[in-house]
Amino acid sequence: MIRKAFVMSVDAGQEAEYEHRHRPIWPELEEMLNAQGVHNYSIFLLPDTRQLFAYAEIEDEARWDAIADTEICKKWWAHMVDVMPSNPDNSPVAENLREVFHID
């Protein structure tokens, strides 16, 4: 498995709504993520800064990248655009993190 981590943020005052929309995520979105080889996907919130830390284990970088081209992902991004900083294509503003330590 490939470990992926990235940070995003949620707009001020939208923390509860962001969490609400993820409890649960849409079944078809979860099915697509599973089909693309995504496992152990978690998102954590640092309340003081509204930073979101995301972690996922993936089977393949190309399959991970292909998620952005799926209709359900684009629909999800459009659904989330009003609660978090987003790019012109509605994807969340995110910055990949470089792993500096790991232990099994």
Image (cartoon, helix red, strand yellow):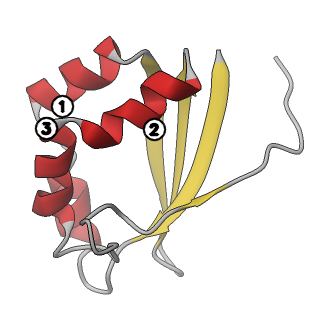
Q: Is residue 97 left or right of residue 79?
A: right
Please name the residue shown 19% across and 62% down the image. Answer: 80
Mark toward the start of the polypeptide (2 vs 1): 1
C-alpha gap between disc 2 and disc 1:
14 Å
| Distance of label 3 from label 1 (alpha carbons) | 6 Å
Badge 3 amino acid: Ile
Q: Mark 2 points at which residue?
A: 42
**The quadrant where residue 103 appears:** top right
Disc 2 packing (10 Å; few <14; some 14–19; many ≥20): few
- Can residue 87 be seen here? yes
How many numbered marks appear?
A: 3
Q: Do the residues labelled 2 and 1 touch (CB within 8 Å)?
A: no
Q: Where is residue 89 in the image (x, y as percent from the top left)?
A: 26, 66
Taking depth in this image into account, of 2 and 22 the one nearest to the observer is 2
Disc sitting over residue 72 in the figure: 3
Q: Which amino acid does label 1 sit on?
A: Leu
Mark 2 or mark 3, which is nearer the start of the sequence? 2
Q: Mark 1 points at which residue?
A: 29
> Mark 3: which secondary structure?
helix
* Residue depicted at x 22% and y 26%: 30
* Image quarter of residue 41: top left
Q: What element carries label 2?
A: strand
